[in-house]
Image (cartoon, grey):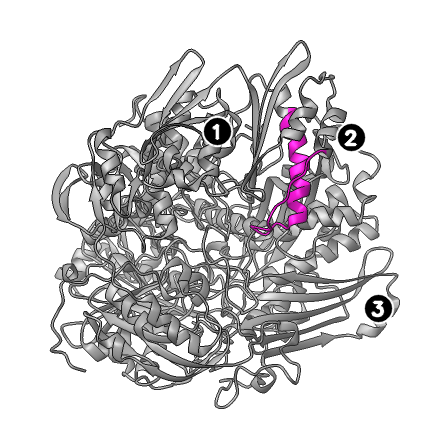
Amino acid sequence: MAGKQLKHSYVGKPLLKNDALALATAQEWFTADYPLEGALHCALLYSPHAHAQIRSIDTEAALAVEGVVDILSYQNVSPILHTSAGQGYPEPSPYDSVLFDRHMRFVGDRVALVAAETLEAAREGAQKIEVDYEFLEPLLDRGRAMEKQAPKLHGGEDHAKIPVAYEPEKNLAAEVEIGFGDLKEGFAEAEFIEEQDYSLPAASHCAMEPHAAAAYIDQRGRLVILSTTQVPFHARRIVSKLIELPLHRIRVIKPRIGGGFGGKQEVILEPLAALVTWRTKRPARLVLSRREVFVATRTRHAADLHLKTGAVKDGRITALQMNCLLEAGAYGTHSLTVLSNVGAKVLPLFNKIENIRFHGRSVYTNLPVSGAYRGYGATQGYFAWNQQIDAVARWAGQDVVEYCKRWHIRSGETSAVFEALGEGKEGVSQVVQSCGLSECLDRGARAIGWAEKRDRRIRVGRDKVKGVGLAVAMQGSGIPLIDMGAASMKMNEDGSFNLYVGATDIGTGSDTILAQIAAEVIQVAIEKIVVLSSDTDLTPFDVGAYASSTTYVSGLAVKTCAEKIAAQILATAASLLETSAESLHLEAEKACDKTGRRSISFEEIATSATYNRDQYQIQAQASYTCQQSPPPFIAQFAEVDVDLQTGRVEVVRFVSAADCGQPINPVLAEGQIEGAVVNGLSYALWEEYLYDENGRMTNPRFWDYRIFTARDTPELQTILVQSVEPTGPFGAKSIGEVAINGPAPAIANAVYDAVGVRIRDLPITPEKVWRALREHSGAADAAGETDGTGGTNRPKGSRRS
Amino acid sequence: MTGTLSINGTELRISLRGDEVLLDLLRDLGYTEVKEGCREGACGSCLVLLEGVLVNSCQVLAASALGREITTVKGLGTFHRPHPVQEAFVEAGAVQCGFCTPGMVLATFALLKKNPRPSEEQIRHALDGNLCRCTGYVKIIESVKLAAERMAPDGR
Amino acid sequence: MDNSLQRTKAADIRPRRLLDSLDLPRPRTHTESVAARKEQVNEVAEIQWYFPNELEEVPDLLAREGVIPHSGGTGILWGGMTRIRALMDVSRLELKFCRIHGGTIDLGAALSYSETAAALGESGHLLGRSLCAAATEPLRNRISLGGSISMFPYWSDLMGPLLAYEAELSLVGANGGARGLGEYLQNRDLRQNTLITSIRLQDRSWQGAYYRHTRTLTDRPAFSITVLLRQSAGRIEEVRIVVVGCSGRYKRLSVVEKLLEGSEVPSDPSELLEQAAQQLDIDFSARMGFSTEYLRACAAIELKRTLASALGSSSPSKPGSRS
């Protein structure tokens, strides 16, 4: 069902985010802001070599620095194998890390930690640690990682926790292969074959708040951790394992977090802060610098993709082969699941293709570690796939918007890929039950002016040509049968409620939308719902903020819990009104009968239940594990002006039309889309990790790693197409990730529309376009140009003053 | 060395190091609303008003601010008495993670003081030192427009 | 673990300001890495600050060992603080002024980019326009004219216009008096123990345009092109073209200027501009992801465009605009 909007009182409304004022007035604290009396400051010492073995560490001079209290290294910390990935247990990422190794596997790998009274003393201590390295040959080319003579990064006791392909002796961190039908036959039937290589670099999340963790021991001798985590419960489990402290003696609290985008879906700093505190019995805080965030946390997986698509005259795709090589970097966190997602989130979108093969590998290299990053493999896959589709549609003489409308998966349909490819293991079969993608395509195309601009190569001024491009994508809503969220609620005597959720608000506003869901069930204003989230002592479990799971999975847990609360309220009201619960309904903080004449307020009900009669605490809890993962869909359109002389690509307008079911809060849903789009635009045009010949990142600063400011951002339009997801809370699906998938391929397709060259490796820099134009010197002078209004337009990035 | 600083109207006598940067000094004194995002002068998380002028506190040597007036976001408004700019940010849905918000609020305040009726272009230009990765800037620009509409011509 | 370690007060510790360990240069061998670490740690005394109230105090202060002028401080922080011994803050010397008299503009060296642009009227004057496009708002509020001239990074948005205007500097200290900007830049000795107090421009009714070659808009420029010209009766009377960021850090395109001066300006000047671009002889280092070849090609293209813009400029658009 598309384009339908259900009527509610609290859900579907742009209610104000319940922490917005506290954040705008800086009333709220982030991890680095919490006052911690006498806290030790920590500094990390990193390997300056991409590949080395530590022969010895001498900390004598470092310990002599005034103020230094403790130093951690392989010498005094148990080498417990684990993965830092914030995933459910048993994690689908290999256990290939220890806290302090002797084997250094990238420039930025951890050598030692110094805890001191001041940050300066800690840093001075770190630099006085004398390390004797044995230099090893580094592996810096992912294309050569599996060659026999390539340097090996792992082996020994490294292992996969679940039965999956893992061959560290070949530098293979993960491998996935699925196939249906007969590829050979499919290509034989094809009248047109598009076979191309695509490539994407590593990228940084650039959350404005750097990673940080603090730890202290409370009055009962328990270890309390505050950190910038998207995964508090996974953090608790992993810290328990690594510092060998029983889980029940650890509490993890997530305060306000300044953005995550996947970069904080890791357990990196928590065990370190915990260890310092546990050893010294003093509070400790570790806050990373921006440079450390770039180098020593996590990145998007760099990827090489090879796609081969065969089609026949009417446009039907007869065969699709997708090969993918992901760069895990030094450790394999998320490398299996991101790899699986490249296929799992891309291939089902055109579900009528009968002959498919997906084969992917993640390999180790001596470079910074890749991990979870919004989009999670789908971004990489869609960059390649959307360009293939654009090429096929053009060859078939069809408009790509109509082409996508014809071939995309529909409500009521399934794809064999759902079952074949999960995240790391087999997936779960599902039937799509809501899909508004066709409407997304229509409305988005109208908004960008597709018909007026596509294939026209409208001239803009003397030297620029206009083009428009499309990208479509789907994602998921949680990981079926794996992701679990839970909620509990209690009612207070004034008719208000406390809602406890494990779900992790990292700036997304999940605290607010979960309150909206509860409010809708119970019919109470959200100001009367006090939300407490992500405290492992006080809130029930939730996997955390990833896989676009919060609205759908945690939302359904909240809905179920709220329904139980509603039932209790009705029962008590019925008793007080001496009628049946069935004859009453909840409305505007009251229980009323059908006529509306008899009613009793929540306050009266709760006061009675708490103090007066048949006293009991109105309270409930519920858990939810999603059985399926209903995909949100998106159609994204880029309008670009390409400078024929310099190759500079200016994105003039960008339209996103998204189907996330019934958005619980349209403003927050738009906010997710808009943020993801601008991130995607930066990544498409400027972002990349650069390394020198020794594997050292050369641009770990905003000075050199450029992301968009308000001055760079084009006109953005966001359209929410409303379908109704029957399995979702009030018809909702999730929306956190999908919008980051479209910008890069939409821009690449738009550039081709404008000037006839395809850039298949990101970022799409002016120089790449310039070189491509020179190589295809005829392409830019394509026939049929229309003179645009031109005249006053100026090339972007080069302000003519 | 020692000297006085006026922060949000309160005069403080402090001791500081000659190479200390204003950001660190402010945070050490408890003004944690001034955030560290990059220490390069690129992200704007650390913005303060120095004698009413918007600056990156990570790029100001604290000693050069002695005897001067500093305003942090808490000098503009508090939770219980928010500034119209802060209210506008809340209402326009411009606050997601909130880490960039103090800097954005100060930049907006500084802009509207100079130019009470800025064009969209001028807004983007005035906020070009404030990075945000959550919002895509869309609702932030809307909230600046909303704040401009609401505030008296001479700002507040 | 010995918990009885005494708590040391922050004020008692005097380490140098250290960057995180990722800043360390990468040593080539393990032995060198051990040796490199030993060298890096050295004690640095507290930085001494001076706050002179009168210009008369300046020469003596600057004559002392290691005293460097501080105005905005962004350049000092950028260069790293480790070798700084003493700073002389100029904020009490009243060097924030803009005096326009006749055709002469005198700018106090402590003016920030923003203050300069505001004083000159942002959209009217080429220098105001170039400074408005530079960096970001809070940095424009802090980068000072004097600081920027004395540091002169390749990415300066200030230098092109100042060189095109053939600015004159007033200096105080070991090398007092008035000096041409070009002379100041060529002669390193002039920067020692010397403070720039003001910058003088002779402002005639120039037409002008400014181009900066960046990645994103708030980026530093890989290079910039400044054009000033005067036309009369359909001819170019005088033209000045400065490229900053090329090899040698900057270049005045006198050959191109000579070709253009005296030329008639047709209604479609493309051919003339093409000829001008042919005379362009300039080189660049690869930087910011741009290759030498590409930068050279862009310089030629943008030279033509900047000239065209200057020729057409009567009421030029505001920098940062999209029109």
Q: Which residue is mark 2?
A: A786
Locate residue A588, reporting x and y percent: 31, 46
Q: Is the same chain shared between marks 3 and 1? A: no
Query: The residue tagged with tag 3: helix, strand or loop?
Result: helix
Q: Nearer the viewer, mark 3 or mark 2?
A: 2
Distance from label 3 to label 2 (Cα)? 39 Å
The alpha-carbon separation of the residues under discs 3 and 1 comes to 65 Å
Residue stretch in magenta = C279-308
Q: Amino acid at mark 3?
A: Phe
Expressed as whole percent of the image width and height from the top left, the position of residue A413 reads 67, 63
Q: Secondary structure at mark 1?
A: helix
Mark 3 or 2, nearer chain start: 3
Depth check: give the residue in front, A517 or A643.
A643
**Drawn side of residue A778 relative to residue C39, left or right:** right
Q: Is residue B149 above or below residue A612?
A: above
Location of residue C296 (image quadrant): top right
User: Can the viewer see residue A793 in this picture?
Assistant: no
Residue that carries the numbered disc 1 in the rendered image = C162
